């Protein structure tokens, strides 16, 4: 059974229930039940129309839950007015659900959890496993999130930027468990980009596709990180790159630049280079200048210093780095890299060791420690 | 979205403000302390921030590789070892500030006289996953 297809139906099924008058929280529970039931029943007895099946089962679950909740009068009204299964709601209905799941009143982790469940179609258990917390904790996080957004009216337009930020988080900060969160983020972003006409939605989708394309080359057989310059570019997914570049070009042509398009443009320039030394660093620096203008982010300034080091030489890179907040976690790592390029391996080795101490994840720490060891062995 | 360890020490932490050993408390004070800890864990669960809580027995054994074909070497317990871990809680929160806030709350558990212990807790971040997008 194609579980990705099943999950992709979640938002439109949910939108139908909400449009029939079910409140969001109860409808969301009912859709979740229907998805779980589908996983159980479909392998033996596949439905002819998957979506219609889900709507029927979810609606029945919703009615059962409403009944058992002593809301008798309300149930009777609902049953009396039960509409016929209507046509697919227009995309705006579904888009409102994405806005709701990423509502600014939610904390980032709640928005991520609610998005993955309500519009991502993942089960609570899968989300809990993906983020390495107990299932009971994730259940609470999701029901709290639903209570937080319970009073939000669904007829007000949301801000697409909040939705995109949540999806970026899912893509960028996922653990590598059974569920491939990066792949799920790509799938959901694809749905959002199809549902709403917005160049930044396309920009984010392009950015994800371009980075996801590098996945097979990002880690060595022993699980260690392979830096971009050393990756076997023959292992990059060319189909994913081609799709990302095309989506990006269409978005850029609309002349409404945003940070995701600019980030995607940088990833596309890397993808363009057959070998690391063919990279067009001058253009990459220009895109970083755009990004600094768009976001003012210190992390962007840090990455810009690396790019300046490649385009104008390590001294220029170090000069750019001098303008960057030294308390950033990867500051010492960038300094180490630039000092090594500048012919100062002793200083670089010390900085790599310092950077390893300050790393916030194991893969990066191990990589930095190996760099220090490599230079110390000279 | 980051995990933190809140580490509780039997020994080795700086002295608490209300630094009276538990065997000197009244039974009601002990009950109140335990109730506070349970309520705290329940609140974390309800907030969707709970990951794990464990207490450790104080007695431990030191174990070392004994060489090819030999059993492991054991030793201890060493009474003089200055640090002794009592247990921990693991939380999954949105920010460092939230982790600080929770650790402060846990340190306010009541001790002798029903007053907060002001125990020193050690807050340590977990290593996360490498980000996909780093450039």
Image: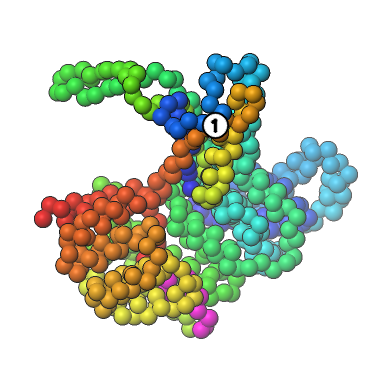
Q: Relative to B90, does residue A367 appear above or below in the rendering?
A: below
Residue nearest the observer in this picture, A370 or A130: A370
Residue A306, image quadrant:
bottom left
> On the picture, is B84 further left or further right than A272?
right
Q: Relative to B37, does residue A275 appear above or below in the rendering?
A: below
B60 in magenta: no
Q: Residue at x 54, y 59 (%)?
A: A166
Q: How is the image coloured?
A: rainbow
Q: Quadrant of the C terminus of chain A?
A: bottom left
A257 in magenta: yes
Q: Residue at x 28, y 64 (%)?
A: A335
Residue nearest the observer in this picture, B10 or A14: B10
**Image coordinates for residue A144, horizontal then vertical, percent:** 66, 46
Residue nearest the observer in this picture, A114 or B48: B48
Q: Which residue is mark 1?
A: B17
Residue nearest the observer in this picture, A330 or A14: A330
Residue A214, image quadrant:
bottom left
Q: Considering the numbered disc 1 on the image, is that residue within a helix, a strand or a loop?
A: loop
**Image coordinates for residue A101, horizontal then vertical, percent:** 63, 57
The subunit letter for the residue under badge 1 reads B
Identity of the residue furthest to the left in this view:
A378
**Image coordinates for residue B75, horizontal then vertical, percent:** 27, 17
Q: Residue at x 37, y 71 (%)?
A: A323
| Residue extent of the magenta highlight | A254-265
Q: Residue at x 57, y 16 (%)?
A: B24
Q: Is residue A219 visible?
A: no
Mark 1: few, some, or many residues within 10 Å (few <14, many ≥20)? few
Q: Relative to B89, does residue B67 appear above or below in the rendering?
A: above
Q: Is residue A73 visible?
A: yes
**Image coordinates for residue A290, horizontal then vertical, percent:** 44, 78
> On the picture, is A222 further left or further right than A206?
left
């Amino acid at each position: 059974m194609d579980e990705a297809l099943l999950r992709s139906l979640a938002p439109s099924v949910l939108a139908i229930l909400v449009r029939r008058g079910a409140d969001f929280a109860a409808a969301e529970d009912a859709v979740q039940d229907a998805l779980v039931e589908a996983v159980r029943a479909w392998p033996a007895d596949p439905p002819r129309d998957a979506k219609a099946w889900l709507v029927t089962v979810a609606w029945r679950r919703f009615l059962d839950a409403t009944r058992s909740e002593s809301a008798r009068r309300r149930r009777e009204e609902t049953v009396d007015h039960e509409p016929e299964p209507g046509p697919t709601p227009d995309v705006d209905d579904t888009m409102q659900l994405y806005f709701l799941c990423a509502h600014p009143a939610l904390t980032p982790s709640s928005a991520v959890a609610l998005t993955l469940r309500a519009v991502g179609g993942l089960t609570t258990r899968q989300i809990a496993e993906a983020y390495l917390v107990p299932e009971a904790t994730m259940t609470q996080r999701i029901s709290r999130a639903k209570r937080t957004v319970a009073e939000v009216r669904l007829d007000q337009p949301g801000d697409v930027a909040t939705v995109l930020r949540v999806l970026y988080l899912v893509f960028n900060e996922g653990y590598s468990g059974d569920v491939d969160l990066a792949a799920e983020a790509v799938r959901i972003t694809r749905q959002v980009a199809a549902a709403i006409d917005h160049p930044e939605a396309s920009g984010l989708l392009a950015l994800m596709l371009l980075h996801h394309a590098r996945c097979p080359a990002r880690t060595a057989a022993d699980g260690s990180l392979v830096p971009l310059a050393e990756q076997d570019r023959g292992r990059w997914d060319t189909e994913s790159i081609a799709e990302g570049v095309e989506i990006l070009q269409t978005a850029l042509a609309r002349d409404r630049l945003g940070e995701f398009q600019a980030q995607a443009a940088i990833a596309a320039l890397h993808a363009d280079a057959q070998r690391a030394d063919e990279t067009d660093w001058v253009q990459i620096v220009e895109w970083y200048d755009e990004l600094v203008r768009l976001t003012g982010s210190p992390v962007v300034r840090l990455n810009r210093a690396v790019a300046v080091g490649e385009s104008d030489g390590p001294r220029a890179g170090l000069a750019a780095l001098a303008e960057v907040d030294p308390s950033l976690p990867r500051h010492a790592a960038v300094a180490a890299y630039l000092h090594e390029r500048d012919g100062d391996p002793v200083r670089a080795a010390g900085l790599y060791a310092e950077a390893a101490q300050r790393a916030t994840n194991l893969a990066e720490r191990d990589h930095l420690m190996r760099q220090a060891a490599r230079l110390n062995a000279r | 979205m980051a995990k933190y360890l809140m580490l509780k020490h039997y020994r080795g932490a700086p002295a608490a403000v209300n630094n009276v050993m538990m065997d000197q408390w009244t039974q009601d004070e002990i009950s109140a302390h335990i109730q506070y800890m349970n309520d705290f864990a329940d609140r974390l669960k309800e907030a969707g921030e709970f990951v794990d809580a464990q207490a450790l027995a104080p007695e431990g054994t030191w174990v070392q590789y004994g060489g090819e074909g030999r059993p492991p070497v054991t030793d201890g317990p060493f009474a003089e070892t200055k640090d002794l871990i009592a247990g921990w809680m693991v939380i999954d929160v949105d920010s460092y500030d939230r982790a600080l806030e929770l650790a402060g709350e846990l340190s306010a558990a009541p001790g002798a006289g029903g007053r907060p212990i002001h125990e020193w807790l050690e807050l340590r971040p977990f290593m996360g996953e490498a980000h996909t997008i780093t450039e």
